Image (tube, rainbow, N blue to C red):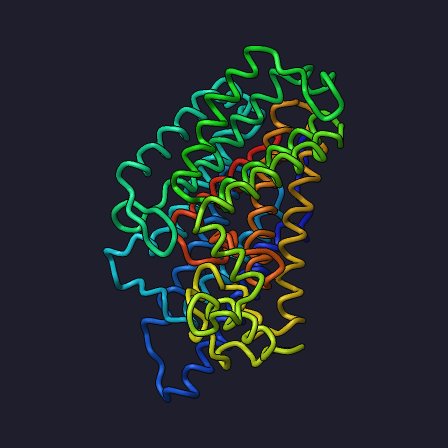
């Protein structure tokens, strides 16, 4: 991949994304002033912090002569900035609470993104191929610790301080899969039967230890959302690595069958399916959350109530799982369509990057990282809009959630490293 200098139009995208976020914040603060009749300084701190962070990011990238994908970066910064605006709107972002971990998620995520983008650029990311199996073993260790030491809260499992390191499992297992499809590419290129790869003993052992055991721990943790996400990523990477769509058919049949069995014997999963099928069976109890989400989206209509003019706090957990419903009420279908357009642009750039890479490991890694973020978005949006059962998956970059936000920026940092040939 030859060196490429970003056109001036692309380099200015970061500034334009920041201005769009500032416009959204200004509308929210003006609406709050119209209601309360005063300016509350604590609501300005997150906005000022975001601007300072973007300026620092721009200076650092210029100093290190970053030549990676500016569009990918600007799209993520816009989505993360819009997330800051939503948290200001909901009053869930209090930067004066110095002991709150989520306050440091955005700067920590951006810092890790820059470090990874700079350290692994120029083809150095190929060194991660040797760490594919250790990455899977670390993921297995994280899940084991969560099973032994985690505590359950709102359907998820967290460590002290509501930290959820299982988010890192996405990155670690995508690295493992990229290494797997690089080493055993011939096994997938020449399947034993249509839709069934030639599973030689080493490949079988690797999949058992590094894939099936983590999936078993996810079942014990009742994290069905992450398990579904990772297995769909596996199918996408298998299809794109081999060019054989039969793997997708076989995989979907296996995932569907396993999902039906798990839902039948796991009360947590069957409850979510029941709510999805008929939320009105318990409208003030288990169905309340999804019904409030649908009501908010319907009340937003075509143009929305306007930023700061809706009632998003009526939606349970609006800041994290249901942030899209909160946006839909105030931005309407048109505004949400623009936000979804930014997501589609991000995913398009990620898959286009993967298509342009020639190294098998780098190509598989870019595919897996982009697919993971895209599928995570689809699972969240599908659950919020009642297209599929709720999974408890957050919306990348937008949702409140320290571990999820940091992990999304880690994945972005690796994609940016892959896009920078220098």
Tag count: 0
Q: Is residue 45 above or below residue 221?
A: below
Q: Is residue 294 above or below residue 142?
A: below
- Residue at 52% of width from left, 52% of height from top? 396
Closest to the observer, 53 or 188: 188
Closest to the observer, 212 or 57: 212
The furthest residue to the top: 201
Residue 89's x, y, as percent?
A: 43, 72
- Residue at 67% of width from left, 52% of height from top? 345
Relative side of 193 to 20, left or right: right
The furthest residue to the front: 264
Residue 349's x, y, as percent?
A: 67, 44
Q: Report the quarter where the C terminus lies.
A: top right
Residue 233's x, y, as percent?
A: 60, 37
Residue 387's x, y, as percent?
A: 63, 59
Closest to the observer, 127 or 301: 301
- Residue at 60% of width from left, 16% of height from top? 183
- Residue at 35% of width from left, 47% of height from top? 157
Relative side of 38 to 238, left or right: left
Q: Report the quarter where the N terminus lies.
A: top right
Relative side of 361 to 406, left or right: right
Q: Is residue 223 above or below residue 311?
A: above
């Amino acid at each position: 991949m030859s060196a490429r200098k970003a056109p001036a139009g692309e380099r200015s995208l970061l500034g334009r994304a920041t201005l769009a976020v500032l416009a959204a914040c200004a509308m929210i603060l003006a609406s709050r002033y119209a209601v309360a009749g005063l300016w509350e300084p604590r609501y300005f701190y997150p906005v000022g912090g975001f601007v300072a962070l973007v300026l620092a990011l721009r200076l650092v990238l210029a100093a290190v002569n970053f030549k990676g994908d500016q569009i990918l970066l600007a799209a993520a910064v816009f989505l993360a900035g819009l997330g800051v605006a939503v948290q200001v709107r909901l009053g869930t972002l209090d930067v004066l609470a110095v002991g709150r971990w989520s306050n440091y998620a955005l700067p920590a995520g951006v810092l890790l993104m820059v470090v990874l983008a700079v350290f692994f650029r120029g083809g150095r990311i190929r060194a991660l191929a040797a760490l594919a199996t250790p990455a899977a073993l670390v993921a297995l260790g994280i899940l084991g610790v969560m099973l032994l030491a985690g505590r359950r809260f709102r359907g998820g499992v967290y460590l002290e301080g509501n930290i959820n390191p299982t988010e890192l499992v996405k990155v670690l297992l995508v690295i493992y899969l990229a290494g797997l499809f690089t080493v055993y590419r011939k096994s997938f290129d020449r399947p034993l039967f249509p839709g069934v790869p030639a599973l030689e003993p080493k490949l079988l052992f690797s999949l058992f230890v590094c894939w099936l055991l983590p999936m078993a721990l996810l079942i014990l943790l009742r994290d069905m959302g992450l398990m579904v996400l990772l297995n769909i990523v596996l199918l996408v990477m298998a299809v794109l690595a081999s060019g054989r769509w039969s793997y997708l058919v076989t995989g979907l049949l296996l995932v569907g069958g396993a999902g039906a069995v798990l839902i039948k014997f796991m009360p947590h999963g069957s409850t979510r399916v029941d709510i999805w099928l008929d939320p009105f069976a318990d409208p003030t109890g288990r169905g309340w959350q999804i019904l409030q989400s649908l009501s908010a989206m319907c009340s937003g209509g075509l143009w929305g109530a306007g930023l700061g003019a809706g009632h998003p706090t009526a939606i349970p957990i609006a800041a994290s799982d249901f942030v899209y419903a909160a946006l839909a009420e105030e931005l309407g279908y048109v505004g949400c369509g623009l936000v979804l357009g930014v997501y589609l642009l991000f995913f398009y750039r990620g898959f286009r990057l993967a298509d342009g890479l020639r190294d098998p490991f780098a190509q598989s890694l870019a595919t897996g990282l982009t697919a993971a973020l895209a599928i995570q978005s689809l699972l969240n949006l599908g659950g919020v809009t009642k297209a599929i059962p709720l999974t408890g998956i957050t919306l990348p970059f937008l949702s409140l959630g320290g571990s999820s936000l940091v992990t999304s920026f880690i994945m972005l940092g690796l994609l940016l490293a892959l896009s920078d040939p220098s």
